[in-house]
Image (spheres, rainbow, N blue to C red):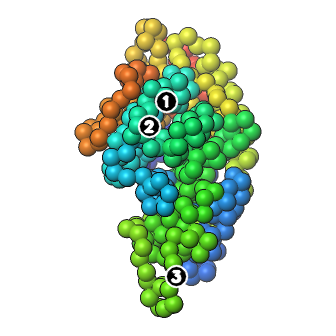
Amino acid sequence: MIWPGRSRERRMFWDLAADTWGPEERAAVARVLASGRYTIGPEVENFERAFAAYHGRRFGVMVNSGSSANLIAVASLFYRKERPLKRGDQAIVPAISWSTTYHPLQQYGLRLRFVDVEPDTLNVDTSQLEAALTPATRAVVAVSILGNPAALDQVRAFADRHGLAFLEDNCESLDAELDGRKTGTFGDLSTFSFFFSHHISTGEGGMVLTDDAELDGLLRALRAHGWTRDVPATAAIFDARGDAFTEAYRFILPGYNVRPQEINGAVGQEQLKKLPAMTKQRRANWQSFRSAFGNDARFLIQREHGRTSSFSFTIIVRPESGLERDDVFAPLKTADIGYRMITGGCFPRHDAIRHFDHDCVGDLANANMAHDRGFFVGNHPFDLTKQIERMRDVLDGLKA
């Protein structure tokens, strides 16, 4: 992937993403190559157990991307025994997230109700949840944007109060915390991404966490062809038969093949060991960025809610500043500083929305402002003091 302003031939002074693999990850890859087993197996299983334990959850199901994690998480809610979702049900979603937060919901026939975000946290405005509720509402999705925890406790209470399924998309906020509790532990299902630029990277990869044995079994069947082979008996999603041969090739759900590889699982184990230290450095960089830009009246930066794991640094160019976003982009490009849209911007603004059954609660003014006037620069698990200082110098020179 080529980021805005990034050359294929050289590194930028401050790029959006950085390699976090060291000799430990390369040794893990070598271990898998030496084993001769490359597809899903014990390395993936070990990573699933370690990742679930890190979050204090019962079950972890690894897949080949965070997008696939969202896909099978949504699908599993359609096949549970009690109160399964069905086509035509409504789901409340925040207006800002990545596209594959929304696509599985559309693909399974849900009607989406888009709710605005808070202008400073960029997370769902929970004061609008009750207004978004209708008799057809059956699910709510919360996304913690770019390492900053959403009001997940409030969304959890809202879901419980109205009997809604709660899907927590935590793909951008691994290791963030709310009241001492890790994000990714509030939803009935919580999803994570291990893409190259994320808090830990397995190259490509994702995970779904849950405490529900039935959902765990459904996720495992959906991950691999819809068959029973990887489903524990404790999931109780099918009745075993006597014929072991046919049982090994028994398909019970319309599933996929979104399995990870052993290399992904092996590297994930090493990255997870490094996660606390990497988060500590990301937070130190966040404090430096906040010191540099927190009192700049021209810009609105993300207000920390809970304890951020700081995926990146967001800036919204305030309308009253006299500046346009392009006024900022030009000097950043000259200074060799990468930038991009805040997550996926306001999703109803994208062409794909014509394929969705949806409506919007209000005018989504804050999401639109972030879409039109916002951007982010990267955060990495190493010291960014020089990069932040250069950006400060560059933006100090702007004239309205």
Query: Does residue 129 appear left or right of residue 267 in this picture?
Result: left
Kind of residue sitting beneath label 1: Leu
Is residue 211 visible from the viewing direction of this image?
yes
User: Given contact means CB atoms under 8 Å apart, are the residues at marks 2 and 1 in contact?
Assistant: yes
User: Residue drawn 45% across and 66% down?
Assistant: 222
Q: Earlier in the sequence, mark 2 or mark 1?
A: 2
Residue closer to the observer: 323 or 234: 234
Three-letter residue code for mark 2? Ile
Quadrant location of residue 320? Answer: top left
Q: Residue at coordinates 61% horizontally, 80% vertically from top-left?
A: 34
Q: Which residue is mark 3?
A: 240
Q: Secondary structure at mark 3?
A: loop
Q: Which mark is residue 129?
A: 1
Q: Is residue 55 rendered to the left or right of residue 92? A: right
Q: Is residue 345 visible?
A: no
Cα separation, mark 3 vs mark 2, equals 37 Å
Residue closest to the eye, 153 or 355: 153
Amino acid type, mark 3 = Ala
Residue 27 percent across, percent down from the top left: 66, 68
Q: Which residue is mark 2?
A: 92
What kind of element bears circle 1?
helix
399 with respect to 29 (left or right): left
